[in-house]
Image (cartoon, rainbow, N blue to C red):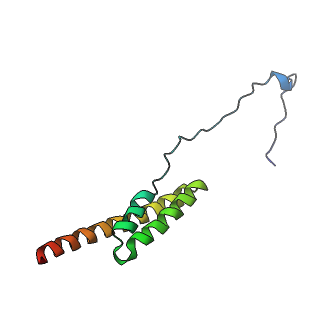
Amino acid sequence: LPPYEMLPQGMCRDELSRSTAVLIEGEQPPPRDHLVWSLCTTLYGNVFCLGLLATVFSIKSRDRKVLHDHSGALSYGSTAKCLNITALVINILLIIAILIIV
């Protein structure tokens, strides 16, 4: 229990000033889950199943966002973003290679 101090002589409890300190944190924007991008990667460029993995991580990110786990949602969302970028780069390189071969 916290230590309590005695009131000075002749002072009533009602005479003391009452104040409450409230700390309000700034509202953080919700982390991005990149679900639409992951679904497009899954449907149109699923090289090495990277699109499917990105979709799984996007869904996990959305679940964490619903549970108000900001750091978990941010982590899963960034993993989905990296997988989407990797799949996009591989798809572009494959298209360029096919055009060069043809």
Q: Quadrant of residue 23?
A: top right
Horizontal and vertical percent position of residue 79: 42, 66
Please tell me which residue lies in front, 89 or 76.
89
What count of labels does the image hold? 0
Q: Residue at x 78, y 25 (%)?
A: 16
Q: Residue at x 84, y 30 (%)?
A: 7
Q: Is residue 85 visible?
A: yes
Is 72 situated above or below 22?
A: below
Horizontal and vertical percent position of residue 49: 39, 76
Is 57 situated above or below 98?
A: above
Q: Is residue 34 visible?
A: no
Tell me: 93 left or right of 4: left
Q: Residue at x 86, y 23 (%)?
A: 12
Q: Residue furthest front?
A: 102
Horizontal and vertical percent position of residue 88: 30, 66
Tell me: 48 left or right of 97: right
Quadrant where the C terminus is found in the figure: bottom left
Is 90 situated above or below 14?
A: below
Please tell me which residue lies in front, 70 or 41.
41
Q: Quadrant of residue 46?
A: bottom left
Tell me: 54 left or right of 6: left
Q: Residue at x 36, y 78 (%)?
A: 48
Horizontal and vertical percent position of residue 89: 27, 68
